[in-house]
Image: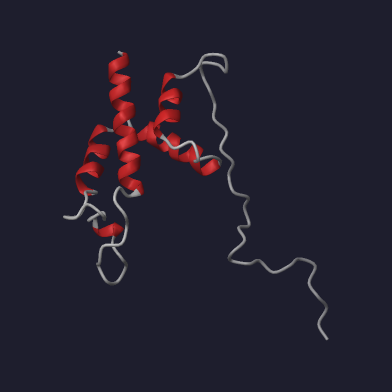
Amino acid sequence: MPEPSAAPPISPLVPAVPWPTHQAVDPVGPDVPDPLDALLAEVVPTRAVGVAADLFRDLARELSVNVAMWSTLLAEHTASADGRFCVHRQCRRGGYGSLATPHPCSVRTLALIACTLHRAAEDRR
């Protein structure tokens, strides 16, 4: 009978490397509030908490600088004729092409937040 191995088998569902934790680095300092953080708190729903929400907010902040990207996302992720679904092909039901994702989809929401952040930064200048 073979001896049991010392290390348990690696499961494809359990990552071998721990998930990276988000640690924001504030170059200005912790005492100086960032005006974009206040805007993000208003725009992003307050029920969104945790690492995923922090990453979503950081992505929106980075995307707000790239006007061509968020304007393209807004132009592509539009509502269907009845206004209920996103018509972008990546938001459709896989293999069928039927409309499946409610409008506004998460990509459009991210682009809308980036647009709002960009306009707020422009108004601040």
Q: Nearer the viewer, residue 5 or 76?
A: 76
Pick out the residue farthest to the bottom. 1
Q: Nearer the viewer, residue 82 or 93?
A: 82
User: Going 31% across and 54% down the picture, which residue do you hit?
Assistant: 102
Q: Quadrant of residue 7?
A: bottom right
Q: How many marks?
A: 0
Residue 118: x percent and y percent? Answer: 30, 26
Question: If the image is split into quadrants, where does the C terminus sit?
Answer: top left
Q: Quadrant of residue 109?
A: top left
Question: If the image is split into quadrants, where does the N terminus sit?
Answer: bottom right
Reply above or below: 121 against 85: above
Residue 8: x percent and y percent? Answer: 74, 67
User: Going 22% across and 38% down the picture, which residue do you hit?
Assistant: 71
Q: Nearer the viewer, residue 81 or 40?
A: 81
Question: Is 112 placed left or right of 1 in the picture?
Answer: left
User: Going 33% across and 31% down the picture, which residue do you hit?
Assistant: 64
Residue 59: x percent and y percent? Answer: 41, 37
Please say whether residue 65 is visible from this viewpoint.
no
Q: Coloured how?
A: secondary structure
User: Going 51% across and 19% down the picture, which residue do you hit?
Assistant: 27
Reply above or below: 26 against 10: above
Question: Is 63 placed left or right of 97 in the picture?
Answer: right
Residue 51: x percent and y percent? Answer: 55, 41
Please say whether residue 99 is visible from this viewpoint.
yes
